[in-house]
Image (cartoon, rainbow, N blue to C red):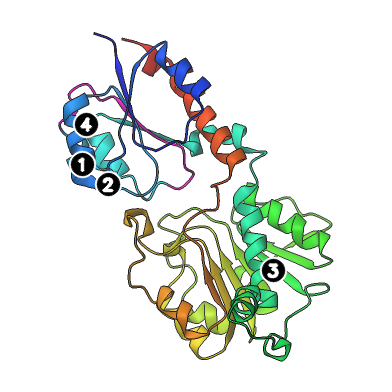
Amino acid sequence: MRRRLLITEQDSYLSSDLERLSKIFEVHRVVPRNQAELAAAVREIDPEVLIVGLGIVVGRPEVRDGRTLKIVVSPTTGTDHLRIEELEASGIQVISLRNMQEGLRSVSSTAELAWGLVLILARQLVSAANSTSAGEWHREKFLGQQLRTKTLGVIGLGRLGRFVAQYGLAFGMRVVATDSEATTQSSEILLVTIQELLAESDVISIHVPLNGTTRGMIGVNEVKSMKKGALLVNTSRGEVVDEDAIASGIRSEHLGGYGTDVISGDSGWSGLVRANPITELVSGGFNVVVTPHIGGYTNEAVNHTRRLVVDYVLNHSDIRSS
């Protein structure tokens, strides 16, 4: 019997990559709608390799009936949808795009979305477009902000943070950044403390992984430390901010706007928006924009990252060994 591989993402892999996998594995594709359907698929197919995307949390209960399962792979940089400790305790190796950093250097899609959110907030583009769609023509309602000469604060100066910093420089902004691992001072990007960044920035963009240190890193005190009217963008994870504090800052007009591609707990959402302090603001006339976790969801990024995953599966000795 050929070794089996199960992919739970729909239409995310090029036919050429599926053909490459088929030379080694019996490839199955199932798109479960929830954890119970995922568990049933694992039990029925019994794959050696399970490739999962966002949308369903994967832990021990979902894979416990996989008798031959050796590895769970996710083509994502975030891993909050994976119960890594549970899986590894069961002898299952967990691989994500964090294991493939070199191959991600050219992938800028999430950074581009972050900059799009900056522009949307600065010019109230969604509200202005909705107003026009409703048949109105009231430019006086949408007085915006010019970005040139303003200060951009980048929290997390990794791959995506550096892209966003470059965009800010191209727009004529002063750029400051904070990163616990960045040590090289740039002539164009000034490294500062998080307190200095919050106090000085007109626009703040967050680009940190979710972990014990970053969870809730932007809370009540941090919001109070920001400039009145500051714009905040988050394409990291919803859990890196205290969403109640953000909502309060928006309602009090201390924050000028919040643009986010991520909401706390959204890795477990399936098809419908759930009640949340941020989503509740969207229809309230506030300068708040929420997109459904589409940062890395472009043709180029999807094809590239899925190919990285296929290459990893085919080339990794632990996977190829019988």
Q: Amino acid at mark 4?
A: Val
Residue annotated with mark 4: 42
Category of crowding for the residue at label 4, using alpha-carbon neighbours closer than 10 angstroms: few (below 14), some (14–19), many (at least 20): many
The magenta-colored residue range is: 65-78
Q: Amino acid at mark 3?
A: Leu
Residue 22, numbered label: none
Give the main secondary structure, helix, strand or loop, of the magenta stretch.
loop
State the SS at label 4. Answer: helix
Task: Tell which of 318 and 61 is nearer to you.
Answer: 61
Residue 33, numbered label: 2
State the SS at label 2. Answer: loop
Image position of 3 with respect to 41: above or below: above
Image position of 20 with respect to 75: above or below: above
x then y, percent, for residue 287: 57, 80
State the SS at label 3. Answer: helix
Q: Amino acid at mark 1?
A: Glu
- Residue ID at (25%, 29%): 91
Residue annotated with mark 3: 119
Image position of 80 with respect to 12: above or below: below
- Residue ID at (31%, 9%): 322
Q: Name which of mark 3 and mark 1 comes first in the sequence.
A: 1
x then y, percent, for residue 151: 75, 72
Front disc: 3 or 2: 2
Residue annotated with mark 1: 37
Q: Name which of mark 4 and mark 1 comes first in the sequence.
A: 1
